[in-house]
Image: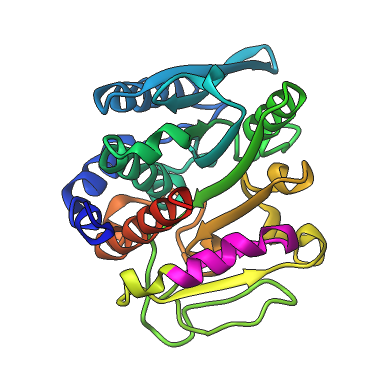
Amino acid sequence: MSIEEFLDKVEHSNLRRIVQAISIPRHGCYNYEALSLIGKFIYEQFREYGYIVEFDEFSYNGRDYKNIIATTEGISSKKDWLLIGAHYDSAMGSPGADDNASGIAVMLEVARVIRDNPVAEKLKFVAFTLEEPQAFDLKFIIGSSHFVKKFKRLGYRYTAIILESVGYFSDKKGSQNLPVFVKGPDTGNFIGIVGNGKSKPLLELFEEVKKYVPSLKIITHKVPINGWLSIETRFSDHAPFWDAGFQAVMITDTAMFRNPFYHTSQDTPDKLNFSFMLEVTKTLLATVLIKQSY
């Protein structure tokens, strides 16, 4: 089956269904039970698609949390992986449709479509928990930091693609802001791919796949010194992979720099552009197919 034929299998309705199903407040501290229910939903989706689902469990502030891991043959089957990840918790008081039900929806749809392709054997899908700032200590990126430290210590090696807020689109001039030291357009009608110096091959790969989804405007950006000059470029689950020396990129609509409902009670499914998300899904799918065919 050609890449184009795989892209045609992506379904707009699946993206909408998943976003609507998980867009409830699910903060790790204030909505612990809801977060657990959403974790169960993600687990069941992966199982329905035919994956082996395992957990990376840890404790934080006296409670147990789970990163949810889906593979075709089990996490112990190999040491080198292309990891597709997204966090499933939300900010305090927010239903988190864009941040980050959108990322989870795209990840799950890629997992569904690619399951019967041989390249799926090389993929590890991970739904991370506790990405958002926590109560009292405001620590964040907790789940992915635990994951990276644990599995690097065990000898695993990763190339990671992290989905972070990928559903908000605006074609109004002036709708886009940018972090300090980052240059780009002032209209929020593109998807951003952010990587560090070591991740240059991944950034170049996303440039290569533009031809498969020509209607989507893709802007790649390479940050110096692991993003420390523009600290907001480190505000998601790719940062622990950078710090561990792995290649990693973040796919993002730029979150707070575009979406006025970011981290509020108004971050709801009706604010998202599902046609935009469909194109993001196809872009990620094409990227995975090309990379894993090398």
Between 83 and 81, which is closer to the camera in this rendering? 81
Q: Which residue, as the protein is rendered here, is positioned at the far bottom? A: 173
Compared to 42, does 170 lie above or below? below
Compared to 121, does 292 lie above or below? below
On the image, the x and y values in percent for residue 270 come to: 26, 56
> In the displayed structure, does residue 53 sit left or right of residue 131?
left
Residue at 39% over, 19% down: 52
Compared to 26, does 190 lie above or below? below
> In the displayed structure, does residue 217 sit left or right of residue 222?
left
Quarter of the view holding residue 137: top right
Query: Residues in magenta?
Result: 191-208
Q: Could you tell me if residue 71 is visible in this image?
A: yes
Between 241 and 137, which is closer to the camera in this rendering? 241
Quarter of the view holding residue 110: top left
Residue at 57% over, 68% down: 204
Residue at 68% over, 76% down: 182
Q: Is residue 193 magenta?
A: yes
Q: Could you tell me if residue 134 is visible in this image?
A: no
Q: Main secondary structure of the magenta part?
A: helix
On the image, the x and y values in percent for residue 260 come to: 47, 65
Q: Which residue, as the protein is rendered here, is positioned at the far front? A: 294
Circle count = 0
> In the displayed structure, does residue 241 sit left or right of residue 286?
right
Between 159 and 86, which is closer to the camera in this rendering? 159
Q: Is residue 252 magenta?
A: no
On the image, the x and y values in percent for residue 160 come to: 58, 45
Quarter of the view holding residue 30: top right
Compared to 46, does 283 lie above or below? below
**Rendering colour mode:** rainbow
On the image, the x and y values in percent for residue 57 come to: 59, 16
